[in-house]
Amino acid sequence: MRKINPQHHSVEQTTDSKLKFAYLACLITAVGIAVVYGFQSFYLDSIETFSNIISPLIAGIAVFSSFYALKIYWINIQSQLSRIWLCFTIGTLLWFFGELGWAVYTFVLNVEIPYPSILDAFWLSGYVPLFVALLLYVPSLNLQYQEKCFF
């Protein structure tokens, strides 16, 4: 008969409740942003400001989350999962620099539409490590396709 350590069990429950709270907070935030964008025709003057603030904020949250996952799952560079999270973190970091730079251009430098700029290089180059992370991740799923799946 297996004994359950009550201290370990309470740690798992605390972690589960924190994850549930984080998921709920993300869901509420996503719905809130969707509502704001859905009714943007009622406040056209402020939607540009909102967009220039929320985009770097979301990108920053993505960078923070990917750094946290990289810290948790990092073993060494030979580890497949470590390489996936490293590529994902680099991609989100480049995406964040592009979004943050856009906000600086529009708020600080008063450039209405900073296009083309060096920011596009950051933003577009972020897709390379994100794509590499995806390519590294898909084979680890061990998906088996049948020949007749596509025809």
Image (tube, rainbow, N blue to C red):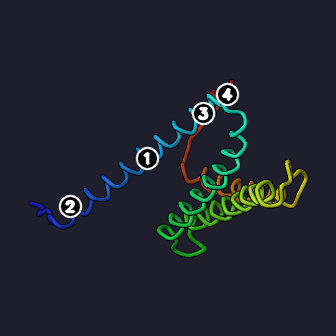
Helix, strand or loop at mark 4: loop
Checking the image for residue 150, the label placed there is 4
| Residue denoted by label 3 | 146
| Residue drawn at (65%, 52%) of the image | 134
Which kind of residue does numbered mark 1 sit on? Ala
Q: Nearer the viewer, residue 119 or 7?
A: 119
Helix, strand or loop at mark 2: helix
Q: In the picture, residue 80 is in which quadrant? A: bottom right
The furthest residue to the bottom: 76
C-alpha gap between disc 3 and disc 4: 8 Å
C-alpha gap between disc 1 and disc 3: 40 Å
C-alpha gap between disc 4 and disc 2: 48 Å
- Quarter of the figure with the N terminus: bottom left
Do the CB atoms of the residues marked 1 and 2 lie less than 8 Å apart? no
Which kind of residue does numbered mark 2 sit on? Ser
| Residue denoted by label 2 | 10
Q: Who comes first in sequence, dot 4 or dot 1? A: 1
